[in-house]
Amino acid sequence: MVKFMPKFTRRNAILGGTAGAAVLAGGGALVLSSEIESFYARLVRHYLPGEPIAPGAAEAFASDYMSADEDLSKVKPLMYMQQVAGFVGLDEILGGQGPYETFVRRVTTNFMLGSTFFQRMLQSDPVEYVSIAQVCGNPFARFD
């Protein structure tokens, strides 16, 4: 039989709550500790499935694109959501919404235009990253 039973006091509740919050924050920090660069690289690889992207090409693009992207504060929540739900979950949650679709298209379009994606002789040739392409906002627009 237990001879010592701690009392449930306000002090014990505060100490227990603080300890629990510290444990949750530590676990959350592990989940959210990814870099935005790796998020961009994973995004490119996810949305160009089956394309033979050369080793390091998506990572080099992500490094360059991160310095060119205008608002990283909007990317961080997406990165955190992706770490928890994955790209499939992110697509289910946000798929079809204009801002998310525009973001995904902008990143993948910039990778394709700044790489050898369209210059390959064979579709099996690896896609090499060259640099961020300097093009208009919608490079595939038709001005007829």
Image: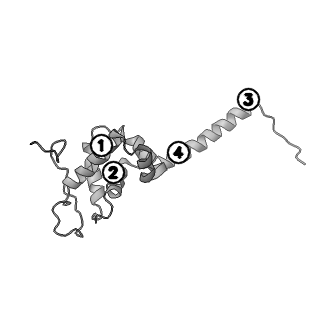
Q: Residues within 10 Å of mark 4 (few under 14, many from 20)?
A: few
Across and down, in percent, residue 81 comes to 45, 45
Cα–Cα gap, marks 3 and 1 = 50 Å
Residue for point 55% across, 42% down: 25
Between circles 2 and 1, the one closer to the viewer is 1
Residue for point 64% across, 40% down: 19
Q: Which residue is mark 4?
A: 28
Viewer-side residue, 89 vs 68: 89
User: For the residue labelled by badge 3, is the local secondary structure a helix, a strand or a loop?
Assistant: helix
Q: Which residue is mark 2?
A: 40
Between circles 4 and 3, the one closer to the viewer is 4
Between circles 3 and 2, the one closer to the viewer is 2
User: For the residue labelled by badge 2, is the local secondary structure a helix, a strand or a loop?
Assistant: helix
Query: Which amino acid does the dot numbered 2 rest on?
Result: Tyr
Residue reaching furthest to the left: 144
Cα–Cα gap, marks 4 and 3 = 26 Å
Q: Which residue is mark 1?
A: 102
Residue 85, compared with residue 49, is above or below; it is above
User: For the residue labelled by badge 1, is the local secondary structure a helix, a strand or a loop?
Assistant: helix
Cα–Cα gap, marks 4 and 2 = 21 Å
Q: CB atoms at circles 4 and 1 under 8 Å apart? A: no
- Which label sits on residue 10? 3
Residue for point 27% across, 38% down: 70
Query: Which amino acid does the dot numbered 4 rest on?
Result: Gly
Viewer-side residue, 31 vs 101: 101
Looking at the image, is mark 4 or mark 3 earlier in the sequence?
3
Query: Which amino acid does the dot numbered 3 rest on?
Result: Arg
